Image (spheres, rainbow, N blue to C red):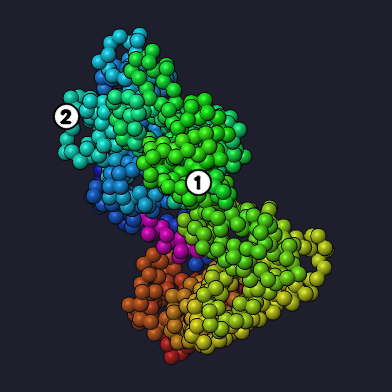
Amino acid sequence: MFQSVRHMIYDLIEWRSQILSGTLPQDELKELKKKVTAKIDYGNRILDLDLVVRDEDGNILDPELTSTISLFRAHEVASKQVEERLQEEKSQKQNVDINRQARFAATPSLALFVNLKNVVCKIGEDAEVLMSLYDPVESKFISENYLVRWSSSGLPKDIDRLHNLRAVFTDLGSTDLKREKISFVCQIVRVGRMELRDNNTRKLTSGLRRPFGVAVMDVTDIINGKVDDEDKQHFIPFQPVAGENDFLQTVINKVIAAKEVNHKGQGLWVTLKLLPGDVHQIRKEFPHLVDRTTAVARKTGFPEIIMPGDVRNDIYVTLVQGDFDKGSKTTAKNVEVTVSVFDEDGKRLEHVIFPGAGDEAISEYKSVIYYQVKQPRWFETVKVAIPIEDANRSHLRFTFRHRSSQDSKDKSEKIFALAFVKLMRYDGTTLRDGEHDLIVYKAEAKKLEDAATYLSLPSTKAELEEKGHSATGRSMQSLGSCTISKDSFQISTLVCSTKLTQNVDLLGLLKWRSNTNLLQQNLRQLMKVDGGEVVKFLQDTLDALFNIMMENSESETFDTLVFDALVFIIGLIADRKFQHFNPVLETYIKKHFSATLAYTKLTKVLRNYVDSAEKPGVGEQLYKAMKALEYVFKFIVRSRVLFNQLYENKGEADFRESLLQLFRSISTMMSSLSDQTVRVKGAALKYLPTIVNDVKLVFDPKELSTVFTEFILNVPAGSLTVQKLYCLIEIVHSDLFTQHDCREILLPMMTDQLKHHLERQEDLEACCQLLSNVLELLYRKDVGPTPRHVQVIMEKLLRTVNRTVISMGRDSELIVSARGPGRGLFPPQGRPAGPPPLSFQTELLPLPCRNRCLPCLPFKTCSFSSVDVGGRADRCFGDESVGLHLCGHSL
């Protein structure tokens, strides 16, 4: 114990010096103060000293200026934090590991930090070191490459990056944590001669990309947070290809399956660390690891949570495999595939292909060459990033060329075939994700270089069959000046675009004016579109919906469908996966939304739904509408505010009446005894309070208070009690309850509800929370006069509260929880053996006064001669039968 306290005191002295130095940034100073107060509280606990309650900044709370409820809750929080610290101290390393895993599992986005220390391989030529994450179960890469160009001298080609070869693999999420295995794979591609054993380099072709070998490490435990040691250097053994003709993908799978690799001392040295957060967070929180020079290799595809502002137009293109006839040659060809992007005029788009993070963009990508292999399998992926304005006119072009090991022969080799695929389909959507079996065309080399020669031809075998041609025949077919070859070539693509959609239904809605006959169908189909696709086009989709509504203002044909679509979108934003789009929706409403008449249609459709609540088939959609109520009313209110700015409050009476009718319909629905409305009524109780702060901008707050009073009173007795009480708690938290005139209307209803449920001992925890929140608010100085409202609570609830407390008994969870953290805060005077502790009574009923009360004269069998509740006692409320006495008072 002594040593432990001694170390803590030394820590506090050191931290005090840092704070007094005045050199710490504000964020670090704030964190250090938290550490200091946590250490003090922990020390007090193990020394059995008093627990000090503090505010968020670590300052000690003044009981004279803080309400009893706030003190109690602060005490609970402080006690819980100290308990957690005690548990941490007792935990073994295994438990710490479990906590780390749980922390990473709860983080929506993760990143794997990689620092390449050295490549120990005898290559003999320049090389490309390609690092990526790989799923060995599905045999596919799940991330972009991190590319380091390595020189023949055994150092990075960019010598400035020596000792700074760092990358972070971002966008990992819960689906990746669920993968059975994840491997960190390094592929080494030699760049030079066809064969290393050839020595007469002057006559040999150079710059050829040839397979050299792979290194693989299982990082499943690191990804899952089970291992965490950023300083440990891992050695990843190197496995060379056999005869320089093994497919790199095949070697990867062989190494994964093998128990050990005969590496002969060759391999890579790396450090690895899992970091929580997206790339912006980790740059902020781990600046010593990740800075602006650190390469960022994203997961192929969108992350689970798409961040607003993450504008992308990327297409991942994978060269899968091919089958090439040897033609006039005696052996199979050494096929090199060149990938480039051209527009419809035959102009090449420059610097749009990215072979890997950490490397510059290039204009054409050349594949690895497998020597005299008829059916090469590449599995090489590049990222193509094309400007949005060019996507509609662009296509991928793949040219095939035989490469000779002799330079003189190689120069005479021309392109022998071509394949292509357009990035946009005929219906305006982007190229579909997945594999594409491309047609390999043959023609004279000059004709193949002319885009006009082939762009009008089908690019895939599926297109060919659609046009009535056979795609399986072995004989060559002529189309125009090109001939369809017997050769085959497969690629796979994955589109990651926040500007171009693959969904024809969403595209139909976004371009609804081009075919209004399909508008109803497009609106219905929108609600079947994948959520990720919708949120990527959130603003465009909302603009389309409100344009449809406004341009058909005289008709109600589309109103219900537009309302349903709006509710669908709001429901998507509520999903955890898209929760980061809440600010985008808020910004849209405040800055971009401009439909001045939308409020009339939205109010009318919602009311029609509410009035039809008991009809078959309406309940599910009404339930969704109730869940989306907050944002539906944000649109209604914003629309009305814009209308007022334009027309100077014209039609104010009609608007007020339409809202009143809507609220009356909701109140009437609440009185329904039908079983099919129970779920909808529960949703109304949960979500209606969320509209208060917006609606009071355009609707009289006192009338709104009356509306809520009727709404609560219409809930049938014995039904939805918990939901009703939590609805009242949310009303107390709203701006409405801070206004004196509104409290005059709401408080009598709340006290009646509390009295009713306390007397029946129904949902006491919710009752306790509601009463505590009311009393805490009445303590505040910025909510107008409160004595009358305190008096109402005392007159209506004091006796009921006392009787409820007595009848609960000492074993009640509420009393136990109140006694624990609250010990010693409010010492009773003359406490008898029988009644429950006064700490519970003060927690349940802390009267919000700022003065000490005067001692009271005993009343009959009263057990307490004075109570720390504040204020002068003008009258007393005693209960002779239970032997308790408290002061009702006014200030």
- Which residue occupies the foreground of this view, 178 or 873? 178
Query: Residue, x 39% and y 85% (percent of image)?
Result: 807
How many marks overall?
2
Is the residue 413 above or below the residue 108 in the image? Answer: above
Q: Main secondary structure of the magenta part?
A: helix
- Which residue occupies the foreground of this view, 222 or 778? 222
- Magenta span includes 74: yes
Q: CA distance from mark 2 to mark 1?
A: 44 Å
Mark 1 element type: loop
Task: Identify the residue under disc 2.
Answer: 262
Q: Amino acid at mark 2?
A: Asn
Query: Residue, x 29% and y 36% (percent of image)?
Result: 249
Tell me where residue 810 appears, x and y as whole percent: 34, 78
Tell me where residue 699 appears, x and y as whole percent: 72, 70
Query: Residue, x 44% and y 83% (percent of image)?
Result: 762
Tag 2–tag 1 contact (CB < 8 Å): no
Is the residue 10 above or below the residue 629 in the image? Answer: above
Tell me where residue 557 appears, x and y as whole percent: 68, 71
Query: Residue, x 62% and y 68% (percent of image)?
Result: 561
In the picture provided, is 654 more to the left or to the right than 525? right
Mark 2 element type: loop
Q: Quadrant of the rendered structure where residue 325 is?
A: top left
Q: Amino acid at mark 1?
A: Leu
Residue range highlighted in magenta: 70-82
Tell me where residue 137 appears, x and y as whole percent: 27, 47
Task: Identify the residue under disc 1.
Answer: 431
In the picture provided, is 305 more to the left or to the right than 392? left
- Magenta span includes 396: no
- Which residue occupies the foreground of this view, 186 or 39? 186
